[in-house]
Amino acid sequence: MRSGRHRSRRTTWRVQLDAELADRLDELAGQLINTDQWRRASSPGAVKQAAEQFLIPLANGLCPPAVVRDELYAEARALAKTTRNPAALW
């Protein structure tokens, strides 16, 4: 019974954290496109991986859900295009 309660709290916390990250996508995209990982990425997959690695510390060491990573990737890509960032090609 106790493990069920713990799992429920962990799931609730995770959903809340994911929502907080999603609410900050504009801000996070601006930070992401200025990282070395983003600039060095040479393919769409590498850029998505850079986005995922960028999010992990913000999610208390947890891997973000793919939907949050993909939304950050899309937001950062669009922002990079408007700032003439060479990594925007991916």
Image (cartoon, rainbow, N blue to C red):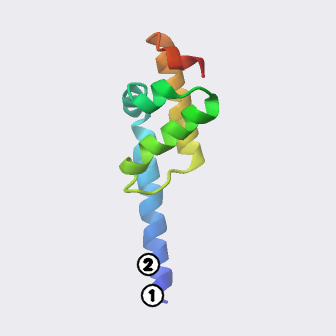
Q: Is residue 63 above or below residue 86?
A: below
Quick one: label 1, few (<14), some, or many (20+) residues within 10 Å? few
Q: Nearer the viewer, residue 27 or 52?
A: 52
Q: Residue at x 56, y 29 (%)?
A: 74
Q: Residue at x 54, y 41 (%)?
A: 69
Residue type at tag 2: His
Q: Element type at marker 2?
A: helix
Q: Is 12 situated left or right of 71 in this image? A: left
Percent x, y of residue 24? 39, 37
Q: Quadrant of residue 33?
A: top left
Percent x, y of residue 61? 40, 56
Percent x, y of residue 77? 53, 23
Q: CA distance from mark 2 to mark 1?
A: 6 Å
Q: Quadrant of the C terminus?
A: top right
Quick one: label 2, few (<14), some, or many (20+) residues within 10 Å? few
In the rendered image, the residue lying farthest to the bottom is 1
Numbered marks: total: 2
Q: Residue at x 37, y 49 (%)?
A: 57
Check contact, mark 2 vs mark 1: CB within 8 A.
yes
Which label was assigned to residue 75? Answer: none
Q: Residue at x 42, y 39 (%)?
A: 23
Q: Is 76 situated left or right of 46 in this image? A: left
Which label was assigned to residue 2? Answer: 1
Percent x, y of residue 55? 43, 44
Q: Nearer the viewer, residue 54 or 22?
A: 54
* Residue that carries the numbered disc 2 in the rendered image: 6
Q: Is residue 3 above or below residue 30?
A: below
Q: Element type at marker 1?
A: helix
Q: Is 56 situated left or right of 69 in this image? A: left
Q: Nearer the viewer, residue 20 or 32?
A: 32
Residue type at tag 1: Arg
